[in-house]
């Protein structure tokens, strides 16, 4: 099980724009990596739009925001355009990244889980938040952690 302080597994996945996104190329700034179950479902839309609506706060905190689900690039592109998402969505079609980050399944294993990781500027996991029902709580809690990191404090 991944835990706080572990080196975040590196990866390269295609974005909704068809470009590769590699985690290790983001070193030097924190990354918010949020896993969500499926494009255009009510909870996932609420979560993505909450990240969108507060995106300027994440930029002010120097963070990169990236969403991940097993939907393909075309689905991500439609979802991103429909909701004007300013951050990339990554296509984890085979679920390999979800496995690497040990994101558990929810609802008796029927749904992919909703887990957000904050990866610090050195590439270490600084925070893990797992909640299928609290979709927009991921945004609030993530911003709190980023503020603590910016102040040089260890996230609580």
Image (cartoon, rainbow, N blue to C red):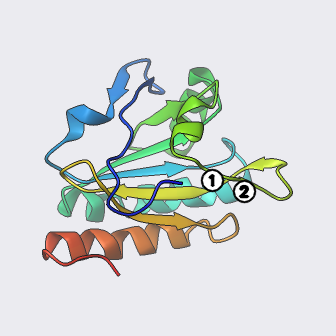
Quarter of the picture containing the C terminus is bottom left
Secondary structure at numbered mark 1: helix
* Residue holding disc 2: 42
In which image quadrant can residue 133 be found? bottom right
Which residue occupies the extreme bottom position in the image? 156
Residue 62: percent from left, percent from top: 18, 56
Which residue sits at x=13%, y=74%? Answer: 152
153 left or right, relative to 53? left
Q: Is residue 153 above or below residue 146?
A: below
Front residue of 107 and 16:
107
The disc at residue 45 is 1
In which image quadrant can residue 117 be found? bottom left
Q: CA distance from mark 2 to mark 1?
A: 5 Å
Which residue sits at x=86%, y=57%? Answer: 108
Q: Answer whether labels 2 and 1 touch (C-beta < 8 Å).
A: yes
Front residue of 82 and 75:
75
Quarter of the picture containing the N terminus is bottom right
Residue 9: percent from left, percent from top: 39, 39
Q: Dot 1, how many residues are within 10 Å of its Cα: few (below 14), some (14-19), or many (20+)?
A: some
């Amino acid at each position: 099980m991944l835990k706080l302080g572990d080196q975040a597994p590196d990866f390269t996945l295609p974005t909704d724009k068809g470009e590769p996104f590699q985690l290790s190329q983001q070193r030097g700034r924190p990354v918010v990596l949020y896993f969500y179950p499926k494009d255009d479902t009510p909870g996932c839309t609420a979560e993505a739009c909450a990240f969108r609506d507060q995106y300027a706060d994440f930029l002010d905190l120097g963070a990169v925001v990236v969403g991940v689900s097993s939907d393909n690039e075309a689905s991500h592109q439609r979802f991103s355009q429909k909701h004007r998402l300013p951050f990339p969505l990554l296509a984890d079609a085979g679920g390999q990244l979800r496995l690497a980050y040990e994101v558990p399944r929810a609802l008796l294993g029927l749904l992919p889980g909703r887990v957000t990781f904050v990866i610090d500027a050195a590439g270490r996991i600084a925070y893990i938040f797992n909640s299928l029902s609290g979709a927009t709580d991921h945004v609030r809690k993530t911003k709190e952690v980023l503020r603590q990191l910016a102040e040089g404090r260890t996230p609580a």
